[in-house]
Amino acid sequence: MLSALFRSVLETPVGAIGLTVDSEGTLVGISLPNRKPSGTPAQPPLPAAARGMHDARAQLSEYFLGKRRAFDLRLAPHGSAFEQQVWTKLLDVPYGVTTSYGAIAAGLGLINGARAVGRANGANPIPIVIPCHRVIGSDGELTGYGGGLPLKRALLELEGAIAPSEPRLF
């Protein structure tokens, strides 16, 4: 049986982000400011969904205030087995640290798998919490991000992973 989905919008320093939880309160999606969630939200939320949404909103707000470095949320990203493997590896990348697509591929035992990791990274349905923004090119350059490179830069600056630049998003 498919779980009902509940959505909310959280205003952040980088713009409005959409949050989606299922009826159990598990976070299943985050829509960045330049992406809109699909589907129609069910209303009113069930108690478990309301708790899950509250926790997601609170923890993301703390993150943007610089008060949270790790998330403690139930997650259920939907994707292929390979995407799930990549997203699990992303959860191991600490706050304020960057890694490369090649390093993630190597960690999965893949030779020449950087592009496949990049595709899985780009399909991440729960950005920020599953920190795909922490993956950069092997040359240290910022590369693609579903929210756009200015947002990726802003998140990495917030975490202290890269030096601040001007102008700053927040």
Image (tube, rainbow, N blue to C red):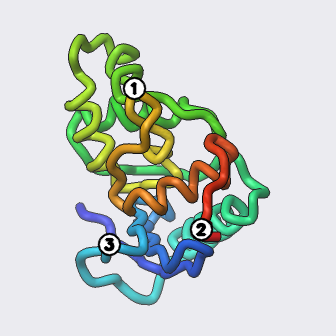
Say above or below: 146 vs 23: above
Q: Earlier in the sequence, mark 2 or mark 1?
A: 1
Which numbered disc, 1 or 3, marks the residue closer to the eye? 1
Q: Residue furthest right?
A: 67
Say which amino acid is labelled 1.
Ser
Real-space CA distance between mark 1 and mark 3, rounded to the nearest whole angstrom: 27 Å
Residue at the far bottom: name it. Answer: 44
Q: Amino acid at mark 3?
A: Arg
Identify the residue at horizontal 35%, vertical 84% (top origin). Answer: 42
Q: Which residue is mark 2?
A: 167
Q: Residues within 10 Å of mark 3 (few under 14, many from 20)?
A: few
Q: Residue 98, located in which quarter of the rendered image?
A: top right
Label 1: few (<14), some (14–19) or many (≥20) C-alpha neighbours in 10 Å: some
Q: Please, which residue is most extreme toward the front here?
A: 166
Please tell me whether mark 2 or mark 1 is closer to you in this view.
2
Q: Nearer the viewer, mark 3 or mark 2?
A: 2
Q: Residue 112, located in which quarter of the rendered image?
A: top left
Q: How many marks?
A: 3
Q: Check disc 2 and give the amino acid type.
A: Pro
| Tag of residue 35 | 3
Label 3 secondary element? loop
- State which tag comes first along the sequence, 1 or 3: 3
Residue bearing mark 1: 138
